Amino acid sequence: MASETFEDIAETFEFLDDWEDRYRHVIDMGRAMPPMEDALKVPANKVDGCASQVWIQPLIDGSGPQARFDFKGDSDAMIVRGLIAVLHALYAGQTVAQVSAIDAQAELARLGLDEHLSSQRSNGLRAMVGRIRSIADQAAA
């Protein structure tokens, strides 16, 4: 159910044998993301449960379960920006109904992130996934 963009990331991770190379790739993905406008870095977009500052601004096109999901995201930590880019690849362009159905833990496990992130980063990643699912669930209603 993962997007083609996410599948490309998974293939790249299979090619990169060393976790340090994967880590650098995630950081590079974060650097390549367009920065979020400061005006959007408001409490309503802040993700609670992250050690770093994280903001997610939903962009929903349409209404109901078939509405298309997208978001802007940013963080003050480069690795977290990269994780936001990974989540963007996983979720952007899906319907809000599909977002709720994606098993993010299983998809991210394919990248080995669960094995190599600190517990703080893993908790933050779960918080970001929870926020995205919550936004999608609200949009689907």
Image: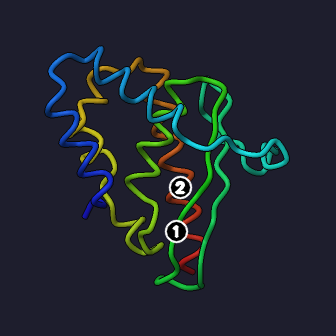
From the viewer's side, name the closer residue of 44 and 28.
28
| Vertical position of residue 78 compared to residue 139: above or below | above
Q: How many marks?
A: 2
| Vertical position of residue 125 compared to residue 37: above or below | above
Q: Amino acid at mark 2?
A: Ile
Query: Is disc 2 surrounded by few (<14), some (14 to 19) or many (20+) residues within 10 Å?
Result: many
Question: Residue tagged by mark 1?
Answer: 69
Question: Residue tagged by mark 2?
Answer: 132
User: Residue 57, image x and y in percent?
Assistant: 67, 54
- Of tags 2 and 1, which is closer to the observer? 1
- In the image, what residue occupies the spot 30% across and 29% down? 114
Position of 18 compared to 131: left or right?
A: left
Q: Secondary structure at mark 2?
A: helix
Residue farthest to the right?
A: 39
Q: Secondary structure at mark 1?
A: strand
Q: How is the model colour-coded?
A: rainbow
User: Residue 75, image x and y in percent?
Assistant: 63, 32
- In the image, what residue occupies the spot 51% across and 34% down? 30
- In the image, what residue occupies the spot 55% across and 85% down? 64
User: Residue 99, image x and y in percent?
Assistant: 42, 65
Indicate which disc, 2 or 1, sits on the residue closer to the N terminus.
Answer: 1
Position of 135 compared to 102: left or right?
A: right
| Vertical position of residue 101 compared to residue 115: above or below | below
| Vertical position of residue 139 compared to residue 87: above or below | below
Q: Are marks 2 and 1 in contact (CB under 8 Å)?
A: yes
Q: Amino acid at mark 1?
A: Phe
